[in-house]
Image (cartoon, helix red, strand yellow):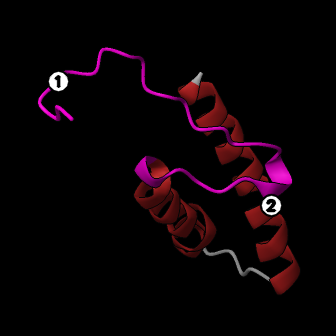
Amino acid sequence: MQYEVIDYRKPKKPNLGPWLTYSVPEKFALGYVWKLFFYMFLIPFVLGLALTPMNIFLNFIIFDYIYYRYIKYTIS
């Protein structure tokens, strides 16, 4: 086998699947964790908002769906 050959094929795009079962691709993982912390805890703390467990859950669902749409748009 020759491993010194340049591969000119287009790289495969990751298949995200449906929203409820997707996992964040590796190249987006650090940004996902940073933005999750920023939007879930830092911004409400700076604005002086008190988050209840239900509110945190709903914020996470909304954040996750928006980030899923962002990844899907960026990949395609």
Reply above or below: 35 against 10.
below
Instruction: Out of 62 and 28, give the one closest to the viewer.
Output: 28
Secondary element under disc 1, as helix, strand or loop, is loop
Provide residue 62's location: percent of width, then percent of height: 79, 54
Left or right, 3 with respect to 20, comes to: left
Reply above or below: 38 against 64.
below
Reply above or below: 48 against 32.
below
Write the start and end of the magenta stretch as one range. Answer: 1-27
Question: Which of disc 1 and disc 2 is earlier in sequence?
Answer: 1
Work out how far the residue at label 2 is from the one at label 1, CA to CA, in angstroms. Answer: 45 Å
Which residue lies at the image location 84% right of the left edge and 66% below the top edge?
Answer: 58
Q: Residues within 10 Å of mark 2 (few under 14, many from 20)?
A: few
Q: Nearer the viewer, mark 2 or mark 1?
A: 1
Dominant secondary structure, magenta: loop
Instruction: Out of 71 and 9, give the one closest to the viewer.
Output: 9
Q: Which residue is mark 2?
A: 61
Q: Amino acid at mark 2?
A: Ile
Provide residue 7's location: percent of width, then percent of height: 28, 21
**Tags 2 and 1 touching, CB below 8 Å:** no
Left or right, 11 with respect to 52, comes to: left
Q: Which residue is mark 1?
A: 5
Which residue lies at the image location 80% right of the left edge and 56% below the top edge?
Answer: 21
Q: Amino acid at mark 1?
A: Val
